Amino acid sequence: MSETARRHPTPSAEAVAALWQLGGLPGDALAHLEVAGNAPVLPSSFDVATAAQAGLAAAALAAAELWHLRTGRRQQVQVDRCHATLECSGWFALDGRVPAMWDKLSGLYACGEVAAAPGWVRIHANFAHHRDIALRLLDLPARPDTPREAVSQALRDWTAEAFEQAAADAGGVVAAARSFAQWDAHPQALALAGQPVLQISPIDGAPPAPAVTWPAIAAAQRPLTGLRVLDLTRILAGPVAGRCLAAYGADVLMVNGPHLPNIEAIADTSRGKRSALIDLRESAGRDQLDALVAQADVFLQGYRPGALAGRGYGAAALAARRPGIVVASLSAYGPDDASGPWAGRRGFDSLVQTATGFNLAEAEAAGKATPQALPMQILDYSAGHLLAFGIQAALWRRATQGGSWQVQVSLAGVGHWLRSLGRVRDGFAVQRPAIEPWLEDSRCGFGEGGQAVLRALRHAAQFSATPAGFDRPSMPPGSHPPSWTDPG
């Protein structure tokens, strides 16, 4: 880092420094990071470029700090602002086909006209069971060909918050559009007030675990070489965290349930991982997972708070099986041990944007009457990179202090962090840059015949000594056995 950069840090450098302090990592490492620029990259009134660049840079620099711990050497880390932002847009193509991001029934709908309480709700219909719950509440046919017009008509009788609550009670996912002021006064927002965007803490009740002496690695080996990560996540944020760790050399084994649906983005977020199926509803499946946990360094999960704990895989139970483990958890609105009425509620990035005020604020800044989404799923991608950062910070603590550690991130908390980065004046005047300079092609196991060409964004962090990259092609769930010794 130059002397000028030290005297006049960019917004991303300031954000990384704050995250670094939160992670408790040595401050000397910050001198080896370059995060130039402060210009907006995508049209928005929010500083999504700083969120993208800072989150990814924190994860990359943490990897470099672990490399320093293992080799005694330092390397430089550079994260291009435009590249990082476009990576967080999640663009990819399979044999030239760019998959649709949304089901045709997903999106925002006006509601409450008949009830004289006009508002907006966002329906998330990418999974059929969530779509069908919403349709049944509206007394509409629960099938994919139900037209949007019918949904719009049926919602005229519902107020936004009544439909949101009814969907939650039925196990669905719907969000009422709120302003920032309305969200800030909400009991769940009040329950989360004052909490950091990232929580790293010792696991309560865990047995003593001595400091871990990491195996020495050669200078050419990537920072996380030999690290074993169990990735029990499916929807964007968690898979992005696992993909990030894989790019830095970790052995990432993604574990899906054979009965659970996925989205097409799995082709992009599975780069660098192996992919196995385990049915935790069966005792044999739990035995398989137990065997994997016994040799894992990290257990990453994104299920609804409390869901895995109910099957015996809460943080304390995992630490009892594997002292020294790092357990990382993602939630929508906060962990299950937080107070507030929405602790444990299901949610996705688009819904959290709507519920916590972003859609109305973005529309107001754009001069539009209809709520407007942010230009990408920045809560998901930032949460993923912050999880990767937190996991590595916890690994550093494990190596220097011992113990078993827990890392927790929520999408709502990331939203609060994004707000803290400030607004962008005239942000909608920005033209979306070309994505082609940052793309790379690789073979994968998805697409027709299971051998498509995956075109996607290269990882944006550049390391001076150990370039990031993906050793394994992206493969569908079940392509590998649930084992750490599979050579594939």
Image (cartoon, rainbow, N blue to C red):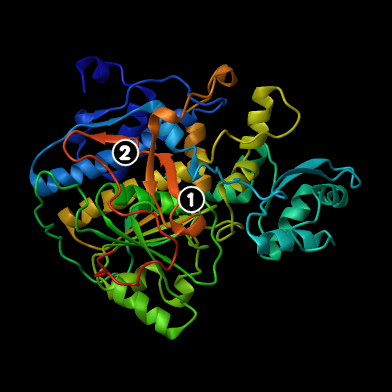
| Position of residue 340 in the picture relative to residue 64 (left or right) | right
Residue 134, percent across and down? 74, 59
Residue at which label 2 appears? 58
Out of 68 and 404, give the one closest to the viewer. 68
Looking at the rendered structure, the secondary structure element under dot 2 is helix
Looking at the rendered structure, the secondary structure element under dot 1 is loop
Residue 332 vertical position relative to residue 277 in the rendered view, above or below: above
Q: Residue 425 got which mark?
A: none
Q: Quadrant of residue 118?
A: top right
Residue at which label 1 appears? 236
Q: Residue at x 27, y 48 (%)?
A: 393
Q: Residue furthest top?
A: 4
**Quarter containing the N terminus:** top left
| Position of residue 186 in the picture relative to residue 297 (left or right) | right
Amino acid type, residue under disc 1 in the picture:
Leu
Q: Quadrant of residue 171?
A: bottom right
**Quarter containing the C terminus:** bottom left
Query: How far apart are labels 1 and 2 at the CA level?
Result: 19 Å
Residue 360, percent across and down? 68, 34
Q: Residue at x 44, y 32 (%)?
A: 85
Out of 325 and 463, give the one closest to the viewer. 463
Q: Residue at x 34, y 28 (%)?
A: 80
